[in-house]
Image (tube, helix red, strand yellow):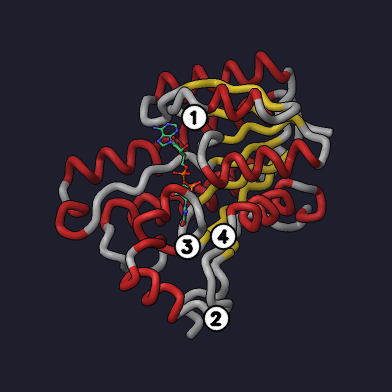
Amino acid sequence: MGSYVITGGAGGMGQAAARRLTEDGHKVILIDVHERVHEVAADIDGATAVVADLGDNDQCRAAVDRAFQSAGQIDGALLAAGLLGTFGPDSRDPEEFDRVMAVNGRGTLVVADAIATRMAAAKTPGSLVLISSGAAFVAIGMASYSASKAAVTAICRELAVAYAEAGIRVNAIAPGLIDTEMASDAKTDPAILGAMLGHTPLGRIGRAEEIAAAAAFLLSDDASYVTATTLRVDGGHLSV
Ligand SMILES: NC(=O)c1ccc[n+]([C@@H]2O[C@H](COP(=O)([O-])OP(=O)(O)OC[C@H]3O[C@@H](n4cnc5c(N)ncnc54)[C@H](O)[C@@H]3O)[C@@H](O)[C@H]2O)c1
């Protein structure tokens, strides 16, 4: 059984993935900017916690160091830390762009690259899964967020190619609307919810456990021939 880093480990998807992976017999190291990550880890057998702001490069690298120190060997990671930023014209503000991109884009790159570099040096094959978004592919009035999630899909391809020879697969998941704290506004606004579900053949919001299940697949050897792809887990959103 393996050890997996989960960023955004205090969040909805991070917690669901932590529960799924530990139920499958793995250990998890949860990294999050929020102190509540300690409580989350204390509640899950096989979980430990690290507090770090992944918008800060030094904290990204220090958090990865701590994960390797505590686990010895890391077999993979789910990078789910992210922030939504603002809607509308404010989302096109350059400072807002830097703020959102620093965590969702650069933080994802720095953490994933640091983990893969150390896995490659240790000759440990494995798998990384990055959380992108359907917003990477369609305009939703959130320019900074969408750009940061499009960056994640590009980072996925780049790292997949860079680390293929080391036996490290890198994939992304593009979730649709998923029932977590991040989606609370969309969920309670009938106009946004109606627009989303009107274009979602499965006709409902997704559950964090459904993202965790997709991540568990991509992290496992069942996905041994899958790399550099972005898997949409969105109830078929925008197919109608
Ligand atoms: N919920 C959705 O509908 C949805 C849809 C598509 C993509 N996503 C993406 O899924 C991922 C997980 O989101 P979620 O739905 O679980 O939301 P969430 O808000 O419950 O979790 C996000 C977590 O990221 C952490 N985080 C934010 N900034 C950080 C930073 N600087 N350093 C470290 N951690 C930080 C937060 O503290 C939080 O625990 C995010 O990347 C999000 O963009 C969510």
Q: Whole-Å distance between the Cαs marked 1 and 2?
A: 33 Å
Q: Which label sits in the foreground, 4 or 2?
A: 2
* Residue 205 percent across, percent down from the top left: 52, 66
Mark 1 residue element: strand
Q: Is mark 1 within 8 Å of ligand 1?
A: yes
| Quarter holding residue 105 | top left
Mark 4 residue element: strand
Q: Left or right of 26: which side holds 76?
A: left
Query: Which residue is disc 3 drawn over?
Result: 177
Q: Whole-Å distance between the Cαs marked 1 and 4?
A: 23 Å
> At 46% across and 58% down in the image, what residue appears?
133
Vertically, is 171 above or below 76? below
Query: Which residue is disc 2 drawn over?
Result: 201
First-in-chain label (3 vs 1): 1
Mark 2 residue element: loop
Query: Which residue is disc 1 drawn over?
Result: 32
Residue type, mark 4 in image: Thr
